[in-house]
């Protein structure tokens, strides 16, 4: 067992546990304003201190984890839901016009600066967590399409796929029954990476005010609100930032660890 | 080589055309009528209609697209609805901040990543590599706007070495450069972490090749073999990432420009979206996307320079 798998899994698991726990218990009410308690440094009563409205920071982080994880998770679902079938289709018809259209479409989406377009989409549809999901999810589609196609292509040349073709199986059945299970490992690793990128993107969008709207706490907006208070009470800016870094770090390490565990050949050179 | 370049040029032109149509379509989806927005809530319907006609907003969509595209090709991107100034001029102004910022960040990222990546590859399997790679993992996980806030706290608020934001203009070159340092560092560090990891893995791959063993057998030291032979062969994946990063730095600066109140292209887009200044959004996004497509094209060409096998 590699340490990155354990350490990454622990960090990511902590974020998930905090989000789940927040549904039944938080150390304070995130909708309750208590100005008298505002900007208190970490103490026994408030482990991570309080924000400018006197709300418990730990409670805010726990509820914020929900938003981050939900947005990133659904965005990965959108990317996989559309991208994987497109990639399988392109690989099954490699060199054909479908392949060409899918790949050129991919190139085009990659050419658009994702953050700018995400901002444009959220501005067009109105700022909300749902629209942030759509904006982030759209950019996951070409990533999964490309990874799926790239991994599926070499498998199509293997003998057991030829055997399946000779046995009379169609391209669609071969794709779902033989190709997909063989590239599932790679897709799981990619999903972990896109999940962590989704958390960063959600934080960025809500930082500029285009993600989850108040009173729903989100890590990005906590940072935006903390910006003017950073010299007065550094903890209000440091705590949400650390939450993002630790979660993203955990997911990245988990992805690395999973890749090593699932495909030992990649262990030596992986970036 | 000529066929390769021609084929890439055709694909470049097509990409630009499709991108322009897509941008136009997406921006049209932004709700809110620019004419009503400019005149305010108390405006008479006739006044709004007259302004819509004057701005050409009453024409059918495809016609408006062709008008706009025709203008863009001849360097006329129309006039800002809000500021009444030519869009092309506004973009050029903002590029004077965004382009130097992106370049500075790119140079910083390469300057940090190159030695780190080479060091990690040379020390592979040892504790030093694990430590360096662990540090780059943290670099990748850093949201650049948070890192920017921490830089401001340390270098602007506490140490008072650098400005916390704003841009004095290039008429004061020293002060202008100073105000770009913190944003460039905030942009560069996470990118440097990615670049260092890619470089390391590409180097580790090439260091396992037979020609490196030959070079060592000839009497080259490990360091010489790395810098003379392995580095050049590890450049392709690094160039790919570098091309993508330049685009990211040009466009991705949108949030950093907001943190530091820099009058760059990203901030222009952000402000224009909130003011429903759609023609500015279209022009500025088109310039960004065109820059990305152009950089990708140049990177493709540079592959052919680095690796002659790809010229076919």
Image (cartoon, coloured by chain):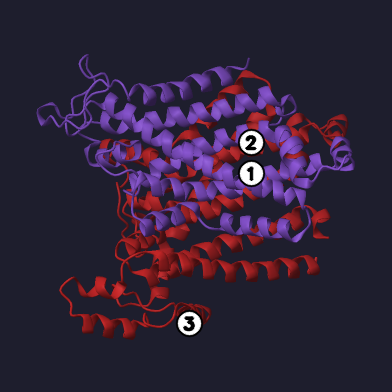
Label 2 vs 1, first from the N-terminus = 1
The answer to whether residue B181 of the structure is visible from this angle is: no
Displayed quadrant of residue B115:
top right
The answer to whether residue A130 of the structure is visible from this angle is: yes
Disc 2 to disc 1, C-alpha distance: 9 Å
Displayed quadrant of residue B232:
top right
| Image point (28%, 38%), residue name | A216
Label 3 marks which chain's residue?
B
In this view, B14 is above or below B206: below
| Image point (59%, 47%), residue name | A82
Which mark is drawn over residue B63?
3
- Crowding near pointer 3: few (<14 within 10 Å), some, many (20+)? few
- On the image, numbered disc 1 is attached to which residue? A84
- On the image, numbered disc 2 is attached to which residue? A187
Q: Residue B283 location in percent, x, y?
A: 44, 70
Label 2 marks which chain's residue?
A
Asked if the residues shown at circle 2 and circle 1 are in contact, with their CB atoms under 8 angstroms apart, the answer is yes
């Amino acid at each position: 067992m590699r340490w990155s798998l354990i350490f990454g899994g622990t960090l990511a698991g902590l974020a998930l546990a905090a989000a789940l726990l927040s549904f039944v218990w938080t150390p304070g009410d995130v909708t309750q304003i208590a100005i008298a308690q505002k900007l208190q440094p970490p103490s026994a009563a408030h482990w991570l201190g309080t924000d400018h409205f006197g709300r418990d920071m730990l409670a805010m982080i726990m509820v914020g984890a929900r938003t981050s994880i939900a947005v990133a998770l659904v965005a990965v679902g959108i990317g996989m839901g559309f991208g994987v079938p497109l990639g399988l289709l392109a690989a099954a018809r490699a060199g054909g016009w479908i392949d060409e259209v899918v790949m050129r479409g991919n190139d085009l989406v990659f050419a658009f600066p994702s953050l700018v377009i995400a901002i444009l989409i959220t501005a067009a549809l109105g700022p909300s967590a749902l629209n942030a999901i759509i904006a982030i999810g759209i950019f996951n589609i070409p990533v999964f399409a490309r990874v799926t196609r790239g991994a599926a292509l070499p498998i199509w040349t293997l003998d057991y796929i030829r055997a399946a073709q000779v046995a009379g199986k169609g391209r669609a059945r071969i794709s779902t029954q033989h190709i997909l299970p063989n590239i599932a490992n790679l897709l799981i690793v990619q999903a972990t990476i896109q999940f962590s990128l989704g958390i960063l993107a959600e934080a960025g969008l809500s930082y500029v005010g285009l993600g989850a709207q108040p009173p729903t706490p989100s890590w990005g907006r906590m940072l935006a609100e903390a910006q003017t208070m950073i010299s007065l009470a550094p903890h209000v800016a440091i705590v949400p930032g650390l939450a993002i870094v630790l979660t993203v770090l955990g997911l990245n390490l988990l992805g690395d660890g999973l890749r090593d565990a699932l495909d030992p050949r990649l262990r030596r050179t992986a970036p | 080589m000529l066929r390769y370049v021609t084929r890439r040029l055709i694909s470049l032109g097509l990409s630009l055309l499709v991108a322009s149509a897509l941008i136009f379509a997406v921006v049209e989806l932004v709700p809110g009528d620019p004419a009503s927005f400019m005149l305010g809530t108390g405006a008479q319907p006739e006044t709004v209609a007259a302004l819509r006609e004057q701005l050409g907003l009453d024409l059918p969509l495809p016609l408006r697209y062709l008008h706009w595209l025709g203008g863009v090709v001849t360097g006329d991107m129309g006039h800002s609805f809000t500021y009444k100034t030519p869009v092309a001029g506004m973009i050029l102004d903002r590029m004077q901040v965004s382009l130097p910022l992106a370049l500075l960040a790119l140079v910083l990222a390469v300057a940090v990543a190159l030695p780190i990546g080479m060091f990690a590859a040379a020390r592979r399997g040892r504790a030093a590599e694990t430590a360096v790679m662990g540090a780059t993992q943290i670099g990748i996980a850093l949201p650049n706007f948070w890192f920017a806030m921490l830089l401001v706290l340390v270098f602007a608020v506490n140490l008072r070495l650098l400005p916390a934001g704003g841009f004095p203009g290039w008429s004061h070159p020293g002060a202008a450069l100073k105000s770009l340092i913190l944003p460039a560092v905030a942009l560069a560090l996470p990118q440097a972490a990615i670049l260092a990891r890619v470089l390391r893995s590409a180097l580790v791959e090439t260091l396992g090749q037979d020609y490196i063993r030959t070079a060592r057998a000839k009497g080259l030291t490990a360091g010489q073999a790395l810098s003379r032979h392995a580095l050049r062969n590890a450049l392709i994946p690094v160039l790919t990432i570098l091309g993508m990063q330049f685009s990211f730095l040009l466009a991705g600066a949108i949030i950093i420009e907001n943190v530091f109140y820099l009058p760059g292209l990203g901030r222009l887009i952000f402000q224009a979206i909130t003011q429903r200044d759609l023609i500015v959004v279209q022009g500025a996004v088109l310039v960004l996307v065109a820059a990305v497509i152009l950089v990708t094209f140049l990177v493709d060409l540079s592959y052919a320079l680095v690796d002659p096998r790809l010229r076919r």
